[in-house]
Amino acid sequence: MNMQSSAVMAPPPPRRLEEMKLPVTMMRDIVLKTIFRKNVSMVSDLARAVCLPIQVTQELIDMARDQRLIEATGTLNANNGNEMGYQLTDAGKARALDALAQSEYYGAMPVPLEVYSEQVKRQSVRNLQITRQQLTDAMGHLVLPGELLDHLGPAVSAGRSVLMYGPPGNGKSSISNGIRDAFGDKVYVPRAIEYAGQVITVYDPIVHSAAEEQVDDPTTLRRNVRYDTRYVRCERPTVITGGELSLSMLDLVYNPTARTYQAPLQLKSTGGIFIVDDLGRQAEPPQALVNRWIVPLEEGRDILALQSGEKFEVPFDTLVIFSTNFHPNEIFDQAALRRIFFKIKIDGPNQENFLKIFAMVARKRGMPLDEATLVHLLKVKYPTIDNVYANYQPIFLIDQMMSICDFEGIPYQMSPDLIDRAWANMFVKDEKIVK
């Protein structure tokens, strides 16, 4: 599917209670808890709170009324289209408190795991076909060798795992972010999913960027719902981790107070990108991290475990990008490397591209270029490090010179002397410190 010509199919809103595929008691209790916690009385307000169509919400209210857990207030609210108000009976309040003691979760009705799995297929990251132009546009701010896109393009379009390796400071993190920016469509992220009666929250405002929201007409009871609002329409998610990543972060997180679960990072990144930056700097060895993902990377499914020890499968649909400064043979065995679909080396720039980066950074910083300074840099300084260039160095050197100019109270400028002072801060001399 070409992402430019085909939009992701939205999850259709349920039309009747039986389409929910959730335990009826669970749905009823969430309604009672939501009324109790949010103090809502109108069906339209309750429908927004539990993220269901009004007709399905009314079915749940009618069921609770038959069980004498909810009663009508007997008054019509003129400010809400003459809606009938509802409230909890004493038995309903008691049931709500009992349900809260079992689980603090209330609000948006969860999506059954099996239903969510179908939506994952409709918006799979592997359905994307990124064009060369899209990737070029997303990385237009980077100076990259032309052949790099030849390798990156197929890797991104395949939606499979990618390992980028090479010397530090050459833009591996920036390239990963550029790949993220090339994804231009939207996906639907569930606020919460349900498995075996347990609620797992998925939507995370820190990870997920919600798209524009549709505002209903407040003068009408009819809600203009085009998709199941138990989902949030978002940009394709991006999870970025570094040295802080641990194996425990890839497991369900149980909240003993609320008695609910939070989805692990890879589940939150479903339909998007999971970037493991600085691989090799984590507490666990890289081999252990990849071993944890052997089955997900190969089979597109992950295995999670509840507090009870029960294990179950969830979709694993994310483009995993590993980025490391180590050579792959130093941190992986051949079996692990075989499971990483694409291996791409990111080298430092040649002198021509280095000068392009230097000029581009200088222009953005408002630092005038000076030919004598550049000649001094290339002919005097870089030969001392065997003419090894890195993408981070122009930014470092120019920012250093700007700081020196600020301190000395002079206009921004370049000179061989300023380059020498900036260069001295770029490296640490290898020497023994006498204690």
Image (cartoon, helix red, strand yellow):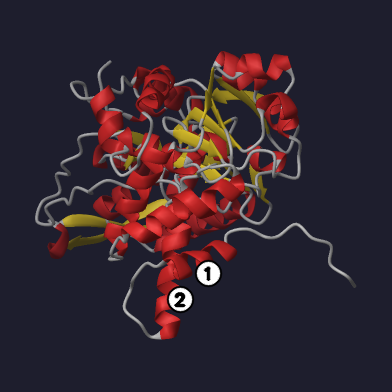
| Disc 2 crowd, CA 10 A, few/some/many (<14, 14-19, 20+) | some
- List the single residue furthest toward the bottom: 409
Nearest the viewer among 264 and 291 is 291
| Disc 1 crowd, CA 10 A, few/some/many (<14, 14-19, 20+) | some
Nearest the viewer among 189 and 307 is 189
Q: Nearer the viewer, mark 1 or mark 2?
A: 1
Residue 351 figure quarter: top left
| Identity of the residue drawn at 17% across and 44% down | 223
| Identity of the residue drawn at 37% across and 20% down | 150
What amino acid does circle 1 point to?
A: Arg
Residue at label 1? 421
| Identity of the residue drawn at 76% across and 36% down | 285
Do labels 1 and 2 touch, CB within 8 Å? yes
Residue 49 as seen in the image, left or right of residue 223: right
* Quarter of the C terminus within the rendering: bottom right
Residue 227 as seen in the image, left or right of residue 81: right
- Rendered view: 43 above or below 343: below
Q: Position of residue 11 (x, y in %)?
A: 31, 28
Q: Can you tell which mark lies on residue 257?
A: none
Residue 229 as seen in the image, left or right of residue 6: right
- Rendered view: 387 above or below 42: above
Label 2: state its secondary structure. helix
Q: Position of residue 400 (x, y in %)?
A: 47, 67
Between disc 1 and disc 2, whose residue precedes?
2
Please indicate, yes or no, whether residue 237 appears anywhere in the rendered image: no
What amino acid does circle 2 point to?
A: Ile
Residue at label 2? 404
Residue 171 as seen in the image, left or right of residue 308: left
